Amino acid sequence: MQRLLLLACCAIAGLVAWSLPAQEKILDLTDTIHVGLVRETAGQAMIDKYGMHEVQLQPEMNFQITTGRSTFLGISTQIGTHVDAGAHVEPDGWTIDQIDLQHLIGPGVLIDVRNKTADDPVTPSDLEKYKIHEGDILLFNFSYRPPKEGELYSQSYLTDETASWLVSHGVKCIGSNTPGLENFKRGVAQHWTDPKNQKVAWPVHKILLSHHVPIVEGLVNLDFLVGREFRFVALPLKLLGADGSPIRAIAFVQ
């Protein structure tokens, strides 16, 4: 009996230790998975031109035939709130099941670049305005609106020099409220989607991911983090050999 009581006391102590401080709150940074998510966030062109599948949510077991319910989920690894692995842009890149989860948990810094347009990139000088330390996770809050029907999205972007700056300063993960971080006008001009141009395509992704800096895309509610101290947590599914994964991303906000 004494041993059981001691174990119970230890369990309670553990729960108390893991409880949130009174001044901290959890902010959900994850978009809701639903049918239509691809068309709404990336545009119908991503489905028509590049073969991305729309989200599928289909009933399986139901209460008419058994005593439980299940749902089939079909979703791209590169839609909604997700994280990229190296295999997303390099044929021999590291896969999502190989990710170091320590890179997805840590102190966050919100980079507010909502004033920038598609012709105004984020440069190292923009980052030097913030207190950024080795091991930080940077979340970029871009000005972004879902694309109109038949169009691709448009946004500001990171330059190659900015990506190299992030690596050299020991940033361990970056994220954004957009479906991407690249200069898409440059991508169109250089035909990045042509397999013959694999070596020149997606330079920002390659710089970051080759140094095992995961890229989180499709975050929501970043406006609530402006000027706030927070810790970031995002955990992917453990998908063998995959190029990315949907995640549940949250912030512990002071």
Image (spheres, rainbow, N blue to C red):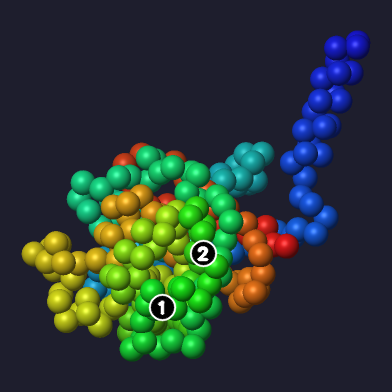
Residue tagged 2? 132
Q: Position of residue 201 (x, y in %)?
A: 20, 67
Q: Is residue 67 above or below residue 176?
A: above
Q: Position of residue 46 (x, y in %)?
A: 31, 72
> Which residue shows up at 89% across the image and 18% down it?
5
Kindly tell me whether residue 58 is visible in this rendering.
Answer: no
Q: Which mark is residue 125?
A: 1
Q: Is residue 92 above or below residue 227?
A: above
Q: Which mark is residue 39?
A: none
Kindly tell me whether residue 198 is visible in this rendering.
Answer: yes
> Which residue shows up at 85% across the image and 24% down it?
8
In the picture as drawn, the residue positioned furthest to the left comes out as: 196
Task: Looking at the image, tell me whether mark 2 or mark 1 is earlier in sequence order.
Answer: 1
Mark 1: secondary structure? helix
Q: Is residue 253 left or right of residue 96?
A: right
> Which residue shows up at 22% across the image and 54% down it?
90
